[in-house]
Amino acid sequence: MCSSDLESEVPWVARARAELGGTTWVNSDANHAITETPQRLEQARQSADQSLVLLKNSPAAGPGGARSPLLPLKIPHSGPYKLAVIGYYAHPQSLYLGGYSSIQAASGAANNVDSYQGLKAAVQAIDPQAQVDWYPGVTGGTTGSTLTTVDPASVSAAKNYDAVVVVAGTDFTTGSEANDRSSLALPGAQAAMISQVEAANPHTVVYLETMGEVDTSSFAGTSPALLWSSYNGQRQGAALADVLLGRVSPSGHLPFTWYADASQLPAITDYNIRPTATTDGRTYQYF
């Protein structure tokens, strides 16, 4: 036993063990994610609420031709309403929570709410008759770098819905502590997916959950509504629904400068803190 675990030397250890039934805590799925209490899960949702950044919310034509901001989505309390949620990251096999997040085993993963799950639950809570469907949008694999093909069936289906939410993102294959990103491009065919879905349905909301800024030049001009967050925790889907349906007003702010394209970035080898005659002195570590 490490000396720092001795109850005689660290009084709070005894109190902590008493709360755990007199045992030493072991990180195991056998604990059934007991530390993920309802209060902590609600805190995860509230933190995610406040992390979402609204980048754009332009008027879109509604019934009768009237134009109004697309967000919040206008869900009827009864009757038919159809929402499509498109994108691999909207409903992935495993919810990516970021490079230094906890590794969720089955019990913890059961508490995760992805974008599709959060939107479906929230929309149908308002209108039980509403139809909320998920489409992959892109195919080819289960990581950003392998999502290389736009799914024609997803694009074709988009035109049949009252509104569409496209979710695009990055993951550990895009960049990590040991590997810098090689470009600002969304990985795979996700940018093409966004453009094609928007062309099929002008009532399209784009949500980007990425490790930082990405190149939006191919679709920003045609996206009526655009939101961003970094990896937004295990209740990210509930938070996205809170914002898209108007329960929460998005109040997040970008924690970085959003470069329009890679030409605005200094050379990756520029480590100068101060400008010189030949360098900008911005150092790539701030990207």
Image (cartoon, rainbow, N blue to C red):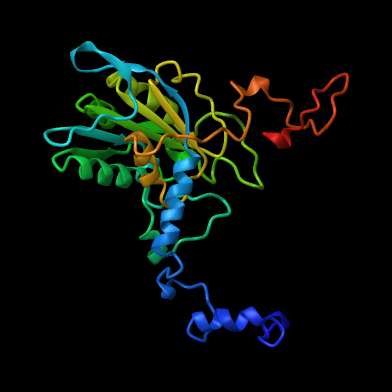
The relative height of residue 236 versus residue 110 in the rendered view (above or below) is: above
What residue appears at the point 62 percent right and 80 percent down from the top-left corner?
13
Q: Position of residue 55 (x, y in %)?
A: 48, 26
Q: Residue at x 38, y 66 (%)?
A: 107
| Count of numbered labels shown in the rendering | 0
- At 38% from the left and 65% from the top, the residue drawn is 106
Image side of residue 85 versus residue 94, left or right: left
Q: Position of residue 189 (x, y in %)?
A: 43, 30
Extreme residue toward the left, this view: 79
Tell me what residue is drawn at x 44 percent, y 31 percent. Answer: 227
Q: Residue 165: horizontal and vertical position, in percent? A: 33, 32
Which residue occupies the foreground of this view, 122 or 164? 122
Position of 97 relative to 248 (above/below)? below
Quadrant containing the C terminus is top right
Q: Quadrant of the N terminus?
A: bottom right
Q: Quadrant of residue 65?
A: top left
Relative to 155, say whether 121 is above or below: below
Q: Residue furthest right?
A: 277
Whole-percent x, y for residue 128 in the image: 15, 43
- Drawn side of residue 241 relative to residue 95, left or right: left
Relative depth, front residue between 74 and 188: 74
- Residue 39 left/right relative to 177: left
10 to the left or right of 123:
right
Check the image and name the residue furthest to the top: 65
Foreground of the two, 43 or 123: 43
